[in-house]
Each structure stands twice: as structure tokens, then as C-alpha cells.
Image (cartoon, rainbow, N blue to C red):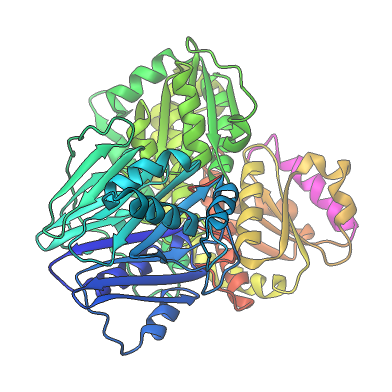
Amino acid sequence: MCGIVGYTGKKSALPFLLDGLEQLEYRGYDSAGVAVVGEGGAAVVRSVGATKELRERIGDRELRGTSGLGHTRWATHGVPSEKNAHPHAAGPLLIVHNGIVENSRSLREELEARGEVFASDTDTETIVRLVNRTMEEGGLSLADAVRSVIHRLEGSYSFLILHRDPEVPLVAVHRGAPLVVGLCDHGVFVASDVTAFPSEVRSTVFLEPDDLLTVEPSGLFGIRCLASGRERAAERIGRNRTEEHGKGDYPHYMLKEICEQPRVLAELLAGKISSGPAGLSLHLPPKVEAVLARARRLRIVGCGTSYHAGLLGKYRIEDLAGRPVEVEIASEFRYREPLLDPASDLLVALTQSGETADTLAALRMAREAGVPTLALVNVPGSTIAREADAVLFLEAGPEFGVAATKTFLAQIALLTLLALHLAPEERLAKKTGLSRQALLSEFLGIPGLLDKSLSLDSSIASLARELAAAPLVLFLGRGADYPLALEGALKFKEITYIHAEGYPGGELKHGPLALVEKETPVIALVSPDPRLLPKMVSNMQETLARGARQSAITARSAFEEMAPLVATELSLPDCSPLFFPILSSVPLQLLAYHTACARGLNVDRPRNLAKSVTVE
């Protein structure tokens, strides 16, 4: 959850550290700090808040040195405060850390009994004090001291340790939380994510679990396995930095990423659908084709937004392809000993970052059971992308807003493509009344309709101002709109801090209707599906009878039936019900965005949340 970055080389370290931390703020932003080591010794600066506050704390101070560490924190042990901010120190050692040391309390008590005096409440300080004491008492090098104590640290984590002597190699450890090395002409970087690297980094090396990295001041580096001590060859991956990481003319990353969705979808579809002699056809990598061909049951796992995308995928794959699909929250799946069948199951892991701790654990469970795995991931080179048997990349580009937008759209688009690909032609025609070719052709036109959906922005902003003071907002949907209702409620609560709930329309009478009173805001997602439309209209009549103030997100052709029931109409371009959730995701995202703005909140960095959840 925290972001860490280190540098050793020929240039001043501080600018690289600060710029890198700004790119890593999506991982945590309640405090930040840097340590710079040079010939004159070491300097450490820490502050509460994000990198902006850290820059202000540094001010005009010159922190000279060509090696350094940086950290942006998402609190797990100890409240957000300057004393708990990283880097932490013990003797000549400085450390930044991401993850959790699960047995830190017992280790801390042991060290305190031996005379160590702690300056913070963090588990991180336990690591550096244990390493320093081991180094001093055993006369060991820094790398050997780290190797000798690592077996005592339980949990999933990574850390960088730097000695105040600039001639001592930097040491990094990967024990479950991601680390990547960046290489350039003037030095070596180590960070939680490639986004922390400057443009001059042209090749990267992804560390594996149980790797220990040492980086000499000269730039020479080596990777050894912690268990065996054997050196491991580094596989260098070229890096093509073409993505624009700034906000451009947009006030927030989230709005920029919402508005990028028509382009993201168009590019995704262009790479998957092409015309040929036999008409339109879907092109999937051979490894994906192989695992799909033998799968009779799909087990989808994900967390948060990815879980909601998986639910929508279940509706599409079961309906069109006729294959059973189970969808579970990854943190529940991994601890309930699920029944897995290597002969018939395929585990599908949904994760934007490719590093989500619970999803990674679920994927590893499946692989240990002999179940083939397919991952839908946005980040090439991420742990899940490397470990899955087959991968479909979301190709959405970097997403810096904590609330997922364009990656959610890419997930549901890919799952819809999978459903179309798996569906027998006869079943597809029976279910939709259209051929695969006709549906894929319509799909290619959805990015244009998505662009038109963005024109609702001013109407949504007006509705958002009404919702800004609401204590509760209900989102309702049926069929594939139900996962969208869940996602709309999640987006809303994530960034507006207003309680929101998503429910199936048919569940209103089973409890949620008790929440509806005069002026309760209700957002109804109404698909143009003729089976569901009259049922949703009936549900809206029920909430209206209790005084609800209703808004409907629906297709233009379906609005006439519900016009008397709503205060705000958000009509989308007409399309097949198959693609309606893709269009309706945009107004849901804009509604959350504008409501948060109306409340004066930081939409890109909501409180207590981080983009990449790499700890349990």
C-alpha cells in the first residue's frame, strides 16, 4: 500500500526521489519522507501529508547526495504522524518499507528487553533495529545481516535499506510486496512501481518473491535468492515510456480518466476485433485460447471494483455462452478452502494493478491445485501478469485516480468479448436475435456512443449538487445492471463519503424499502431489455410512493415509460442491452465525481484508501 523509491548513481538523488514519490501517491499519502546520503553524511526529512507538504518542509535546504530513499505512507501500524513517517533509522542504517510484519510486536518486545529504544509505533522500525543489531553483534555486512534475519520476519512486505556510508551497497528485499529495478546511464532505481521512474530509465528488472538485491555505488547490481543464496540472472525488459502522466487541462486525474474511456475502448476493440474474409472475428492469444477451450466452469475472483466487473461477466458468460460461472471476493475465496477441479475449472483473476494481495493469493491457490489461470490485468510485468497461465491486458494506460474508472470499463468490455467469443452461434442468435458478426460490429460503434454519453456532464453536475447534502443514496438495477448499481454505490461512497448502497430492484421489499422516505435519492439503472424494463418501472413506482426523489439512467427509447416517475432524466444513446452497462458506467462515475467536487473533496486521493492494495 505504501510507495517506496530508491536511487544510487552519479546524479543528485533528491529530485528523482521527490518526483518518484509524486507518481506513487496513489499507493498512500498520509505522510512522506526522504533520506539522502552523500560524502557529508545523511539527511532525513519527513512530514505529515503528501509529497507537496514534504517539498514545503524541505524548502531551500540542500540535501546533497547521490544515493537516497523515499517513501509515501498508507498507515497500517501507527497513526499518521511525523514520527511514524519513513524513512526510519537505527545506527547507521535507514529503511523504507511496504507491507506488514505480522510478528512485529513480539520482535519489538524482544528488542526492547535487550535495550533498544523505539522512536515510532511502526513495524518498520523493528526491521531496521533487528538488522542493525545483527550487523553490529555479528560483524556482518549489511547484505549478510539482512539475509540472516529475514527468516524471523513474518508477513508480506518489501524494503530498501541504505547505509549512511555512501560506499556501502543499497540493499532491497522482496518478500511478497512488489519491487522493480530501473536501469539508466547514470544510476539504478528501485521502486514499488515503474511509474516512479524518470523518462531516462529504458529497461527494468522485476524482482521475484524472496529476492535480495544489492546495488553498488558504481551501478553494478546483483540478485540472490534469500533461501539458497544463489545468484539469479536478471531478465531485463525494455521500457517504452509513451504515456502522458500529467492531468493536462483537467482539474483531476479522475475526470481525465473518465473522459479517456471512448479512446481506451476504441483501442481495446481495435486490437481484438478485425474484419476478414469470414467477417468479423475475435483474436485472442494462443495461450488464452488453450485455457478457454478446456474450461467447463469459470471461477472469477477480484476485489472491490474488479469484483463488480466479475459479477457482470458472470451474467454475460452464463447467458451467452451457457458456461457456469462463479464469482467471489478474493479475500473470501482464499480462506474458505473452495472446491477446485483441475479438469474442468478455469480461475479468472481480475485486478487493475496485478499486485492485489488477496487476488494474487487466490491465483496461487488455484495454481497449486492444478487449475489453469487467466488474468485480466492493466499493468504489464506485474506479479499476477507474470504468474498467470494466460493474460489479457486491459490496455487502459496508467490510472492515477484511486477510484477505478477506465480500468473498470476495460474489464467489462473484455469480459463481454469473452462471452461473445465463447458463445455458440445458435445460442447467441437465440439470446440476442443477432449474429456474432452483427454484435461485434455494433460493439465497434460503442466508443462513439460512449463519447456522446459524456455530453450528459452538465446535467449530472446539476444532480450532483442536489446530492451533496444527502445522508444516503440508493442505486437500483436488475440483471446486468445490478453489478453496475453496486459499482455506482462503491464509487459514490469512495469519493463523496456519503453512505450509498446498491441493490437488485427485486430485493426492495426484502428490507431496503425501509430506508426510503421523503426526498431519499434513488438512482435507477434501467436497461432497455424488454424482460427487465417493466419490472424496474414497477420498482420505481414503489420508491416514488414512499417519497423518493428518483433519477433514471436509461436508453433514450425506454425513457417514455418512466418519465412520470423521475425528477432527473439521464438518457443514453440506444444500443443493444448487451452493451448498455458499458454506456451507463460513465454517468455513474461522473455522478460520484461531481458530488465529491460539490463537497470540496479530493477526488483523486480519497481518505483512508490506496490504489494498489498489496497487503491483506
- Rendered location of residue 17, percent (x, y): 30, 69
| Quadrant (top left, top right, bottom left, bottom right) of the C terminus | top right
Q: Residue furthest bottom?
A: 60
* Residue 46 placement, left or right of 290: right
Does the segment drawn in magenta span residue 70? no
Query: What residue do we see at 37% from left, 59% from top?
Result: 4
Q: Let me know if residue 459 appears in the view.
A: no
- Rendered location of residue 206, percent (x, y): 27, 43
Query: What residue do we see at 53% from left, 13% from top?
Result: 341
Magenta stretch: helix, strand or loop mostly: helix
- Rendered location of residue 360, percent (x, y): 47, 36
Residue 271 position (above or below residue 568): above
Does the segment drawn in magenta span residue 545? yes
Return the residue nearer the eye: 579 or 218: 218
Residue range of the region highlighted in magenta in the rendering: 529-546
Q: Residue furthest top?
A: 343
Q: Let me know if residue 431 appears in the view.
A: yes
Residue 345 position (above or below residue 228): above
